[in-house]
Structures are given as C-alpha cells and as structure tokens.
Amino acid sequence: MYLSFFSLQEMPFSLTPNTQFFCALQPHNEAMQVLLTALKMGEGFIKVTGEVGTGKTLLCRKLLNSLAGDVVVAYLPNPYLNPDELRWAFATELGLQLDPAIDQQTLSQKIEHQLLQLQTEHKSVVLIIDEAQSLSWDALEALRLFTNLETENRKLLQVVLFGQPELDQKLAHERVRQLRQRISFSYKLRAMTTAEVVYYIEHRLSIAGSNNPKLFDKNISLKVAKASRGIPRLVNLLCHKVLLQAFGAGETQLTAKHVAVAIADTEDCAKNNDTLWWAVGTAVVLLSVFSLWLWRQVL
C-alpha cells in the first residue's frame, strides 16, 4: 500500500511473526539462550511466558529455525485439544501413519516405540507448544506422562511451553504439581524499554529496506514507546497506522498528529487528552486513506 511511497521493499511492521525481522533485544536474546541451553542439556520441561503481544510466537518460530538437523521437532500451534487429540497430533508430527481405529493404549505404545527408534538414531525429540495456556488439565497430565519416557541417560522427549501469564497461574495449581516440579528452566518475557523501542523501530525499518534513517525521528518513536508500553505488537500496529496516516495525507514527514490519530484508533494503547482529541476524526481520516489508495490503484 505505502511501500513505494516511503521507498520500502516490504512491510516493516506486519503483525505476522516473520523471523527475518527478529530483533535480538535483551529479553528475547536471553530467552533464546535459555531455550537453547536447556535443550542442549536434555531437560524435560522448559517454559516461556509473557503478556499478549510480547513476541512469544516470533521467539517460538525463531527457535524452530535454530534447531539442528539431529533434532526432530513436533510443533503444536493450537493446543486446544483433549488428551486423545493431543496424542494423535503428536503422533502425526512424529511422522507416524496409523490406523484411526487403533485404541489409545496402542497409540501411546506406537509413540513410545517411535521415540525409542529416534533415540537409537541419535536424534532428540522436542515438542514445542504455542499458546500453552489453552491446554486442559487432562492434556497437561498427558504431557507429563509423555516425559516419563526415558533411558538411563536422557529423556526421550523434551517439551517447550510458550504461553501467556495464565499458564503460570494454571501450573501453580496443586492439581499439576508433579508437572510443575519437572520444569527445569523458565523465562518470563518483559515489555521493551523506551530505548529498546527506538532501536526496534529502526531495526525493522532497516530490514524492510528503508534508506531514510529519519523516517521515524526520536520524538515520534518516543511517543510510540509511551503509548505502546513497550509491547512489540502494539508498536508494530501503531507504526503501521502512522505510516498509513502520512501516506493518506500525501506527507513523507511523520508528525505528532499522525501518531495521535494512530493511538486514538488503537485499542489497549495508553491514551492522554491530546490523543483523545484526535479520536473524533479518526474514522473519517482512515476512510480517506483507503479511498485515496483505491483511487491510486484505479489510476
């Protein structure tokens, strides 16, 4: 939409978790080191939690791309499954092609045999679960039983859980104390600092091919940092809307007015009186932006 207008090669602030844009800030870099170290040590359960929008899924994708060829990865992006569905999903990720009519005991045995076979091939198996706060109590117990599988030297399966703070609350329950005690490493992602937000914006613009280092000046970036509270997803959303506002107005210079309108139009942002004043005209401005873009496409 506004790529050529701002001399960009690709969208710099897309909400899609693209590892090309991974920014190795302190919290994400530390989390990655914890994950890789724990996996290298062969620990059973590893947990990463963080508020909505702090970059857990992007970190998860980065981890998937970082694991060596001797690691067999089973990835479950949607764990809203009962224990039976969880076993079938895991078996499928392990490459097993089984008769759907087999019972759960046979399915579990097939999974165990596959894990043992991979162990004899000197391969480790890692089950990575995103949005793990959605796991049911029974599914958590099924996971714990999976990690009972081990040789004299090492676990046959390692499990990495990515989840929102609700996952910590669920694991604090007495009902899953056995699983909780098996979590050897954990990391809690924090929001970015103001300085990190400024660097983050510059980094993403650079990756997107921007040749204008002043596109987001420090004042604009600071306003975005304050309104977003350092949450990467909100930073991306605000920056995208700021560029959209400027594009719609035909202005290559970003201003505080563009930021104010973007903030007023974005849920969950910290707002002040200045941004609330702009909220009245937000819908009209956004409509004008899209109308202008459609008109340019026709021409």
Image (cartoon, helix red, strand yellow):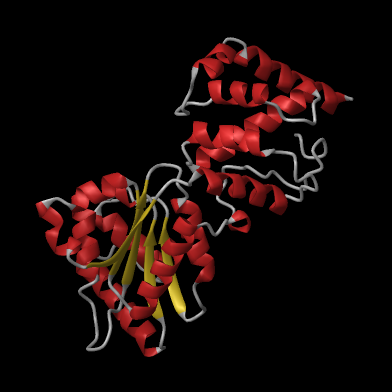
Q: Nearer the viewer, residue 22 or 57?
A: 22
Q: Residue at x 45, y 43 (%)?
A: 53
Q: Quadrant of the C terminus?
A: top right
Residue 111, given in percent of the width and then of the height, sits at: 30, 73
Count of numbered circles on the image: 0
Residue drawn at point x = 35 percent, y = 73 percent: 38
275 relative position to 257: left or right: left
Nearest the viewer among 194 and 200 is 194
For this orientation, the residue located farthest to the right is 299
Q: Is residue 17 left or right of residue 126?
A: right
Where residue 237 sits, quadrant-wise, is: top right
Residue 17 visible (yes or no): yes
Residue at the spot 51% in from the left edge and 54% down from the top edge: 58
Camera-side residue of 103 and 179: 179
Residue 3: horizontal and vertical position, in percent?
77, 39
Residue under the image location 55 percent in, 39 percent down: 235
Measured as percent of width and height from the top left, residue 163 is found at 35, 51
User: 297 or 190, which is in the foreground?
Assistant: 190
From the viewer's perspective, is residue 211 above or below residue 48?
A: above
Quarter of the image containing the N terminus? top right
Give the quadrant of residue 146: bottom left
Quadrant of residue 45 in the image?
Answer: bottom left
Rendered location of residue 46, percent (x, y): 31, 65
> Does any portion of residue 136 appear in the rendered image?
no
Left or right of residue 222: residue 171: left
Report whether 14 appears left or right of 115: right
Give the residue furthest to the top: 280
